[in-house]
Image (spheres, rainbow, N blue to C red):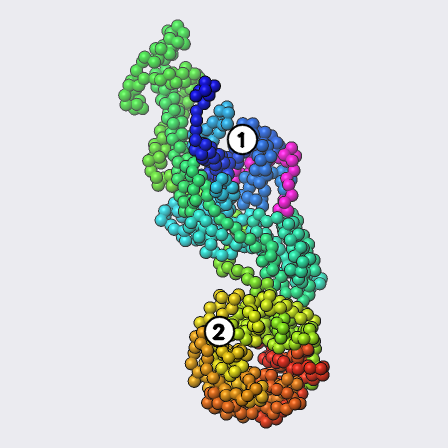
């Protein structure tokens, strides 16, 4: 090797990188980012409090400039930037950041709107009252001291706090490869849990939660999802939902109902939240809001959202929760340093470790007191000996040359004082005792003063005996800790701010949509939309109708469904497939819009189109789907056997052959009568009980025997309540007919006449069950829609052509769909 490099050691770069990175990571974890479980403080916070203590910057003393404290901290204890230290001071003083602020600040320390604090030269600080409890007994050898960064100062390794700060104020920090996020809690609840745990170490998480209900944030709010709190306390990790507190307030002048936000989730910036709401209003993602005002003042937070007269406040509130930070997920990750190592902590772990810490502090304090008392007793013993032998000592002093000789004579003497019954053996004085004897004032020679010294001596002996008893008896130490915790609770306890909801309501998409009656329309070319039912007022029979959909010349409407926005709907294609969605997931458009191509919503194949749209209620899931094809094939399948999760590509619901198509779908309970209607005016009625349930991949069975050029246009389900059927034809004719005119026959036979067909009225397009109190909606292939009362339609016999329901005046205009509307109010409820 070259002589120039003979002192260079070769090392493995991979090993060195691992070692260096690990050292860096541990330095960040221990020295900056994570709190110690015992005092709940990171090093910077601990050093700030200690610097204030050294400067006597107590809660009952004058404020000092923040810059003074920052200077001492960075100069003596924390060799980092002054901004980093000042930012920590600011946060310790913010009432909206800490549940129990550790610094009492005077001046501008920022706001919940995200405003920065004033410069450190302008603000003043001192300890808050609760911080004093962190430093009690610090001078009584209760803790270890370590060297500062340049070994010029001693700083406490930990503070001997009586306050479980790790829980009451929590902590947030990002280290290397790990992070902590411990929420704050109410001090009364925490102290009650600690007191209960001291009495019974076997308490589990659920038992502890009888005392600690959950986090208690300084900004209040509402915590949802109680089971997640339990999970976080049991495992150390969990996610809770925090919501703002909102109320509805009636304006005294305008009588309008306004939405008032008066508490926000923890760490949410108020001004940014308001900006977000305004942005959502501009983008029309939230409608029904007139104005938003920030009316917050010294008395508290108040965001006033003025809503329009016809606004649905419940929907607006749901959208605010869903689209803004009025509801947030708060991840609990209880990581802290224990014995110098990062550890995920359960609630029970935290309580156990802190109580253990307090026991050690109290023992150290007792040992300190014992040492101090023994030293004092030792001096008093010397004084008592000297006072009992004062004449001899005075004579000894008189006959001695100097102080040195006196000390030497006293050191060599053994005192026999059994007659006084103070000591049981001869006693030799120590140097400290001799020193105190030589300092005796003449006034101490009086009998009164001698009695005082004896009284002190006996009291200290008792004190030592008591201290030794406590030190050896764990029950006595427990009593001291319980007394401390009770005092803390009484001294600093306050009411819970954050409310906890036991039942969690997760806001879903349907909660953002107003529950109202709507009309779903689907054109022949596959344009779908929904619009409000209230758009169409009831007209009289024979009316011209109102434009429901603006459609192309070559297109026409072929389906209309009346339902409500929150319903599930089943969409069946002519190819025998089923698609499932919610009504509100369909596109919403006004009257004059043609809608959106359904092929952009559903995965339809070539030549595939939706032929049936069926609203499905939750209480119908135990029923059956009854299907009818154009060739007269029928099939029955259980709804609960359908896998509703497979929605995008659709489910095969029936097998088809010979160019057959699925044309009609109904829901039945399996015990009804079935009627099929053909376009040439034939109908058949048979019992459903004779039709077996089939699987999804079955073909089905024959329902009616058809003549040439005829096909089935409608299949309906009857029950005992049904009395009438409405039959309509393509030229706008229709009639009501009693069901009793159709006799029950065998399945798969030729039907009987249901309506007289001619050129005037045209072929049958549909047949539906009706009641006299119902309304119906009719729509033409030109997009015209009319809503009429059933009571206006005449009841006619089977072999009649019917009456005009809607006038099809335009060229090639045909009636292509009808929809029965039962008592309208019932639509919303189902």
Q: Position of residue 516 (x, y in %)?
A: 61, 70
Residue at image x 40%, y 30%?
369
Q: Position of residue 439 (x, y in %)?
A: 43, 16
Check disc 2 and report its element: helix, strand or loop. loop
Q: In this orientation, which residue lies closer to the viewer: 338 or 558?
A: 558
Rate crowding at label 1 as few (under 14), some (14 to 19) or many (20 or more) other CA atoms within 10 Å.
some
Quadrant for the N terminus in the image? top left
| Residue extent of the magenta highlight | 111-132
Find residue 284 and report its image quarter.
Answer: bottom right
Q: Is residue 473 left or right of residue 302?
A: left
Residue at image x 41%, y 41%?
353
Marked residue nearer the N-terminal end (1 or 2): 1
Would you place residue 541 above or below residue 363 in this image? below
Does residue 14 show up magenta in the picture? Answer: no
Find residue 384 and report its image quarter.
Answer: top left
Quadrant for the C terminus in the image? bottom right
Residue at the limit of the structure toward the top, as seen here:
401
Q: In this orientation, which residue lies closer to the viewer: 756 or 25?
A: 756
Q: Position of residue 164 (x, y in %)?
A: 46, 42
* Residue marked by disc 1: 78
* Residue marked by disc 2: 653
Q: Position of residue 808 (x, y in %)?
A: 69, 83
Does residue 124 show up magenta in the picture? Answer: yes
Q: Is residue 440 visible?
A: yes
Q: Is residue 539 visible?
A: no
- What count of labels does the image hold? 2
Residue at image x 35%, y 35%?
471
Would you place residue 154 above or below residue 396 in this image? below
Q: Is residue 602 left or right of residue 688?
A: right
Check disc 1 and report its element: helix, strand or loop. loop
- Residue 213 badge: none
Q: In this orientation, which residue lies closer to the viewer: 546 or 631?
A: 631
């Amino acid at each position: 090797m070259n002589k120039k490099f003979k002192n260079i050691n070769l090392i493995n770069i991979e090993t060195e990188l691992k070692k260096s990175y690990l050292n860096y990571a541990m330095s960040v974890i221990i020295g900056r980012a994570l709190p110690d479980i015992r005092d709940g403080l990171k090093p910077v916070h601990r050093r700030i409090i200690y610097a204030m203590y050294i400067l006597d910057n107590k809660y009952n003393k004058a404020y000092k400039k923040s810059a003074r404290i920052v200077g001492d901290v960075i100069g003596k204890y924390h060799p980092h930037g002054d901004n980093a230290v000042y930012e920590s001071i600011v946060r310790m003083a913010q009432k909206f950041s800490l549940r129990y602020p550790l610094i009492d600040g005077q001046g501008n320390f920022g706001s919940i709107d995200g405003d920065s604090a004033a410069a450190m030269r302008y603000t003043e600080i001192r300890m808050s009252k609760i911080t004093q409890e962190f430093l009690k007994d610090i001078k009584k050898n209760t803790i270890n001291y370590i060297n500062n960064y340049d070994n010029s100062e001693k700083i406490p390794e930990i503070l001997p706090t009586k306050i479980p700060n790790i829980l009451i104020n929590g902590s947030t920090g990002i280290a290397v490869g790990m992070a902590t996020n411990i929420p704050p809690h109410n001090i009364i609840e925490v102290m009650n849990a600690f007191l209960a745990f001291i009495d019974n170490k076997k308490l589990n998480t659920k038992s502890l939660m009888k005392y600690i209900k959950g986090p208690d944030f300084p900004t209040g709010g509402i915590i949802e999802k109680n089971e997640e709190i339990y999970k976080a306390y049991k495992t150390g990790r969990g996610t809770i939902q925090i919501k703002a507190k909102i109320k509805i307030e009636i304006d005294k002048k305008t009588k309008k109902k306004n939405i008032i936000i008066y508490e926000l989730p923890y760490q949410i910036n108020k001004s940014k939240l308001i900006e977000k709401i305004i942005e959502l209003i501009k983008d029309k993602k939230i409608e029904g809001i007139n104005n938003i005002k920030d009316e917050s003042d010294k008395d508290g937070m108040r965001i006033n959202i003025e809503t329009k007269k016809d606004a649905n406040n419940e929907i607006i509130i749901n959208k605010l929760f869903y689209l803004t930070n009025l509801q947030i997920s708060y991840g609990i990750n209880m990581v802290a340093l224990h014995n110098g190592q990062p550890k995920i902590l359960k609630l029970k772990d935290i309580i156990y470790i802190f109580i253990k810490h307090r026991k050690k502090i109290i023992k150290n304090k007792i040992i300190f007191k014992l040492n101090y008392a023994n030293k004092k007793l030792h001096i008093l013993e010397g004084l008592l000996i000297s006072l009992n032998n004062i004449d001899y000592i005075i004579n000894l002093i008189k006959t001695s040359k100097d102080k040195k000789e006196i000390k030497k004579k006293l050191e060599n003497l053994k005192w026999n004082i059994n007659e006084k019954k103070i000591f049981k053996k001869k006693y030799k004085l120590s140097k400290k005792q001799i020193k105190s004897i030589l300092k005796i004032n003449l006034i101490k020679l009086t009998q009164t003063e001698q009695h005082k010294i004896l009284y002190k001596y006996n009291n200290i002996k008792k004190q030592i005996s008591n201290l030794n008893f406590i030190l050896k008896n764990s029950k006595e130490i427990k009593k001291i800790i319980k007394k401390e915790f009770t005092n803390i609770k009484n001294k600093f306890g306050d009411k819970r701010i954050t409310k906890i909801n036991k039942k969690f309501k997760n806001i879903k998409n349907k909660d953002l949509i107003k529950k109202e009656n709507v009309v779903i329309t689907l054109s022949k070319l596959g344009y779908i939309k929904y619009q409000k039912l209230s758009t169409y007022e009831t007209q009289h029979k024979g009316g011209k109708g109102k434009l429901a959909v603006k459609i192309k010349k070559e297109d026409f409407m072929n389906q209309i469904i009346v339902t409500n926005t929150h319903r599930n709907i089943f969409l069946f294609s002519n190819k025998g497939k089923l698609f499932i969605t919610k009504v509100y997931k369909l596109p919403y458009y006004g009257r004059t819009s043609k809608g959106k191509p359904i092929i952009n919503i559903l995965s339809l194949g070539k030549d595939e189109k939706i032929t049936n749209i069926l609203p499905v209620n939750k209480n119908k899931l135990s029923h059956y789907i009854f299907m009818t094809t154009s060739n007269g094939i029928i099939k029955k399948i259980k709804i609960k056997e359908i896998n509703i999760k497979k929605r995008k590509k659709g489910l095969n619901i029936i097998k088809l052959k010979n160019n057959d198509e699925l044309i009609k779908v109904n829901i039945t309970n399996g015990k009804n009568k079935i009627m099929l209607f053909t376009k040439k005016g034939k109908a058949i009625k048979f019992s459903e009980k004779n039709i077996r349930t089939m699987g999804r991949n079955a073909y089905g069975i024959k329902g009616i025997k058809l003549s040439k050029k005829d096909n089935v246009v409608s299949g309906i389900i009857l029950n005992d309540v049904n009395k009438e059927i409405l039959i309509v034809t393509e030229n706008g004719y229709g009639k009501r007919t009693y069901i009793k005119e159709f006799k029950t026959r065998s399945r798969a036979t030729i039907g009987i006449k249901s309506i007289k067909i001619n050129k005037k009225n045209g072929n049958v397009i549909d047949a539906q069950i009706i009641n006299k109190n119902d309304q119906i909606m009719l729509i033409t292939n030109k997009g015209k829609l009319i809503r009429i009362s059933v009571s206006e339609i005449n009841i006619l016999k089977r072999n009649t052509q019917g009456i005009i329901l809607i006038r099809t005046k335009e060229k090639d205009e045909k009636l292509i769909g009808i929809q029965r509307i039962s008592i309208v109010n019932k639509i919303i409820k189902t």
